[in-house]
Amino acid sequence: MVWNRKSGGIIPFCCFFLLFIGVVSCTISYKFNGASIDYNVVKSISIKDFPNMASYTYAPLASEFTEALKDKFIRQTRLEIVRENGTLDLEGEITDYKSTSMAPKNDGFDSDNRITISIRVRFTNEVNPDEDFEQTFSAYRDFSSDKMLQEVEGQLSAEIVEEIVDQIYNATVANW
């Protein structure tokens, strides 16, 4: 086969053209907030206060959790937050808040402690009742026993709340 210098540019051009046509003809849709909501049908969400029913309580947890959940839906969706009778409805309670000792060292002292938060959620979808559920979401963070619970409680609780809020968001309006 003899290569001609004049036709050397045709093959790369044809490859580029075919690639361009393939890219243009494909439609790819990304939703960066992860929500898959039909805003023509779903207009609002009601998020009731989540009381702290755990045997051990961290005073600001109930209000911090409820506000973080509302903030997530405000930031990530166009749903109107209403007090009652939303197209979507979230309610529940904080069922567990505990600090436990983990992993003893060789000298018999604890090297880590763990804060665990569990929240029971009831989700109602007026448009699609098949998506209704009641589920407990839980998360934890470990911290060194060199620190007192009161020193790390605020920061770790905020991290746990953020993780649980993400779990709830994904379970309710994100179809992963």
Image (cartoon, rainbow, N blue to C red):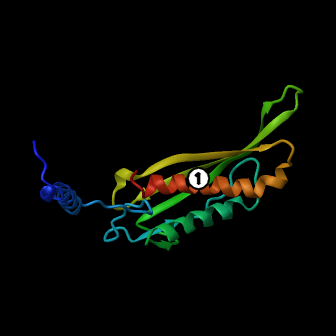
- Residue 133, position in %: x, y? 45, 49
Residue projecting furthest to the left: 1
**How would you rate the neighbour count of disc 1 (Cα within 10 Å): few for under 14, some for 14-19, many for 20 or more?**
many
- Residue type pointed to by label 1: Ile
- What residue sits 85% from the left and 25% below the top? 106
Q: Does residue 125 appear to the left or right of 50 in the view shown?
A: left
| Residue receiving disc 1 | 164
- Residue at 64% x, 56% y is 161
Query: Residue 169, percent across and down?
Result: 49, 57
- Front residue (pair 3, 91): 3
Task: Classify residue 8 by image quadrant.
Answer: bottom left
Q: Residue furthest top?
A: 106
Side of 108 where 131 appears, left or right: left
* Position of 152 relative to 47 (above/below): above
Q: Above or below — where is 33 with respect to 119?
A: below
* Left or right of 78 in this view: 21: left
Residue depicted at 57% across the width and 63% down the height: 69
Which residue is found at the position 53% from the left and 52% from the top?
167
Q: Position of residue 137 (x, y in %)?
A: 57, 47
Helix, strand or loop status at disc 1: helix
**Front-most of residues 28 and 92:** 28
Find residue 136 and report its horizontal and vertical position in percent. Answer: 56, 46
Question: Image quadrant for the N terminus?
Answer: top left
| Number of marks | 1
* Picture layout, residue 36 above or below residue 105: below
Relative to 2, 95 lies left or right: right
